[in-house]
Amino acid sequence: IVEKFGVMKNVLSYYRKEVEKPLAMASLPPSFSWLDGGWVTPARFQGNCGSCWDFAAVGALEAIIKIREGMASLNPDLSEQYILSCLPNAGSCKGGSPYLAYYYIKSTSPEGNYHNGIVTEDCFPYEANDWVPCSRKCGNWEEKLVPIKDYGYWIPDGSNEDRQRIKTQIMEDGPLVSFM
């Protein structure tokens, strides 16, 4: 539906151009999961707030940090509340965009809280409420920022080749965020 009407594609194009589609591996295993070995952080309860988009973005980012650091035991535990309260242009309890969450996490503009990064959960615990003011984050929040280097998107066309590309990207880079 999103691609058919071009809504999300238009929103995404406004903030950043598509990245080149990755190459697909010639031979993929019959199954693969980052859950094996503890590379994915546990699912969390979003409460009475439609912040699944926020949890998807943060969960994928936490897993990618663990994978890039090569430490399944690492617990990056990043703050979903920070995105809801300090980066509200990404979305709210009524919905949002994981892509825009990454855009504003990286942004050093006023809408990005003037800093590239997201704070840890202990600095700004989740309250399932998008009315919590950004000022409620911890006093030393700038020291707790975890910056991101890059992010991107590409839109699959539904072909078998693109399904293979998605599988390859998951294996090579870690969990991906998708939405419709």
Image: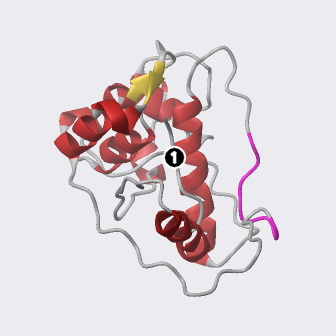
User: Which quadrant holds residue 176?
Assistant: bottom right
Q: Pointer 1: what residue?
A: 178
Position above or below: 176 against 73? above
Quadrant housing the N terminus: top left
Relative side of 70 to 131, left or right:
right
Q: Residue furthest front?
A: 159
Which is nearer the eye, 137 or 152?
A: 152
Specify whether residue 58 is painted magenta.
no
* Amino acid, disc 1: Ser
Which is nearer the eye, 44 or 178?
A: 178
Instruction: Residue at 27%, 42% (x, y): give it.
Output: 12
Q: Main secondary structure of the magenta part?
A: loop
Instruction: Residue at 72%, 80% (x, y): give it.
Output: 29
Coloration of the structure image: secondary structure
Position above or below: 153 against 102? below
Instruction: Residue at 61%, 41% (x, y): give it.
Output: 121
Q: Which residues are magenta?
A: 36-43
Which percent across, then down, holds residue 43?
74, 42
Q: Does the rendering let one see residue 118?
A: yes
Which percent across, then down, holds residue 3?
36, 39
Which is nearer the eye, 128 or 179?
A: 179
Q: Residue furthest right?
A: 37
Q: Does the rendering let one see residue 78?
A: no
Relative side of 58 to 147, left or right:
right
Position above or below: 35 against 108? below
Q: Element under label 1?
A: loop
Instruction: Residue at 36%, 68% (x, y): give it.
Output: 21
Which percent across, then down, holds residue 65?
56, 65
